[in-house]
């Protein structure tokens, strides 16, 4: 290959990179998240879970259960703080379904104490 072929390929690569950057900056950002505590209508799957719960409120059918053994001392305040940080980070753990009189809605709470 001669230098002119390499120069042409390098120029095409620079142009491809420029176009990629331009298209990335022109793309809209991800769908914005709903603000905390904003109510939303349930989807079909969520309505099914709500219905199952109303029929048998004490059921653990939708719980995932696991166990682990911890050897050594446990500091309850450290574990409490860790779970608190987890709930703060995960919207699902701060979510509830409620009937607001007009139907069942999904609520994501800004804070949800353990």
Image: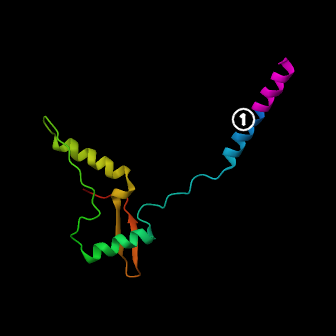
Above or below for 14 versus 37:
above
Q: Hey, which quadrant is residue 62 in on the image?
A: bottom left
Above or below for 32 versus 100:
above
Quadrant (top left, top right, bottom left, bottom right) of the C terminus: bottom left
Q: Residue lying furthest bottom in this view?
A: 101
| Residue 48, position as x, y percentages in the image | 37, 72
| Residue 101, position as x, y percentages in the image | 37, 82
| Residue 92, position as x, y percentages in the image | 37, 58
**Residue drawn at x 81%, y 22% as measured from the top left:** 6
| Residue 51, position as x, y percentages in the image | 33, 75
Residue 89 part of the magenta-drawn span: no
Q: Hey, which quadrant is residue 73 in on the image?
A: top left
Q: Residue lying furthest front in this view?
A: 1
Quadrant (top left, top right, bottom left, bottom right) of the N terminus: top right
Above or below for 7 versus 78:
above
Query: How many marks overall?
Result: 1
Q: Hey, which quadrant is residue 22 in on the image?
A: top right
Q: Is residue 3 visible?
A: yes
Q: 56 or 38: which is nearer to us? A: 56
Magenta stretch prevailing secondary structure: helix
Magenta-tinted stretch:
1-13
Q: From the image, tell me which residue sits under label 1.
A: 17
**Residue drawn at x 41%, y 81% as measured from the top left:** 102
Q: Is residue 24 left or right of residue 49?
A: right
Q: Is residue 29 left or right of residue 94?
A: right
What is the secondary structure assignment of the residue under circle 1?
helix
**Residue drawn at x 24%, y 72% as measured from the top left:** 57
């Amino acid at each position: 290959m001669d230098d002119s072929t390499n120069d042409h390929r390098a120029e095409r690569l620079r142009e491809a990179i420029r176009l990629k950057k331009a298209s990335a900056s022109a793309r809209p950002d991800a769908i914005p998240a709903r603000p905390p505590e904003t109510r939303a209508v349930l989807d079909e799957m969520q309505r099914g879970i709500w219905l199952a719960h109303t029929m048998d409120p004490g059921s653990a059918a939708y719980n995932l259960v696991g166990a682990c053994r911890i050897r050594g001392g446990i500091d309850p305040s450290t574990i409490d703080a860790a779970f608190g940080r987890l709930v703060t980070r995960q919207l699902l753990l701060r979510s509830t379904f409620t009937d607001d009189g007009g139907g069942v809605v999904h609520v994501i709470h800004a804070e949800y104490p353990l």
